[in-house]
Image (cartoon, rainbow, N blue to C red):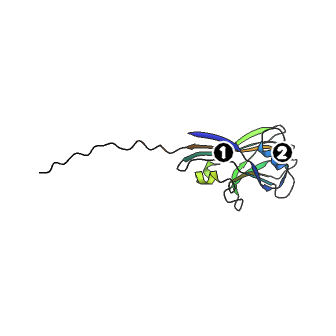
Amino acid sequence: MTVQERASTANGTVAWANQDNLALSDNTYGNDNGGDGKAFRKGFGYAIPTGSTIDKVEMKVEGQTSGTRQCRVYHSVDGELTDILGGTTTTFTGSDTTEIFDVTAQRTWTPGLLNDNDKLRFGVQRTGGSGVVSVDYVALIVTWTEPAAAGPPSRRRRAAWNGP
């Protein structure tokens, strides 16, 4: 079983101020600046072998809020044409909080979907409420099991037929 946490290398939709800051856990923040409030990240760089079983897919979000506003977790596998609400909302406070959301049950995950650096996108969308929600880090944690390796070729001997 393999577990890898990867931050993204590129922005998807740019609707937040300083969205590049979501790539590192370094206490520099991206924050919502109006509009629809979505911040998608892409380019996670997975290279999961074909035939692997995807055991778990989680989104890690680190951030804080200055009021009651929070973030909903979203993902897309078609370049943001369709956004899938993860059904979960952060519970940030006034200091940095790290939350992990299990999105395994949201779809049938395959190595092909998770390896797509352009179409696979994970992100957050601000909710209603007051204050500013600030996000420091967005990462994807994937757990998978590689297919069993093929054994050595069979070395059975054929019985010689000596006839009648």
- Residue shown at 40% from the left, 42% from the top: 152
The x, y position of residue 116, in whole percent, is 65, 54
The x, y position of residue 72, in whole percent, is 75, 50
The x, y position of residue 155, in whole percent, is 33, 42
Q: Nearer the viewer, residue 111 or 76?
A: 111
Q: Is residue 98 visible?
A: yes
Query: Residue 58 shows which numbered tag?
Result: 1
Image-based side of 65 in relation to 122, left or right = right
Q: Is residue 109 visible?
A: no
Please identify the quadrant where the N terminus is shown: top right
- Where 116 sits versus 135, above or below? below
* Contact, mark 1 vs mark 2 (Cβ under 8 Å): no
- Residue shown at 63% from the left, 51% from the top: 115
- Residue shown at 77% from the left, 44% from the top: 23
Q: CA distance from mark 1 to mark 2?
A: 20 Å
The mark nearer the N terminus, 1 or 2, is 1
Mark 1, residues whose alpha carbon is within 10 Å: few (<14), some, or many (≥20)? some
The x, y position of residue 6, in whole percent, is 69, 43
Extreme residue toward the left, this view: 164
Mark 2, residues whose alpha carbon is within 10 Å: few (<14), some, or many (≥20)? many
Secondary structure of the residue carrying tag 2 is strand
Q: Quadrant of residue 145?
A: top right
Image-based side of 14 in relation to 8, left or right = right
Q: Which residue is mark 2?
A: 134
Q: Amino acid at mark 1?
A: Glu
Secondary structure of the residue carrying tag 1 is strand
Q: Nearer the viewer, residue 42 or 129?
A: 42
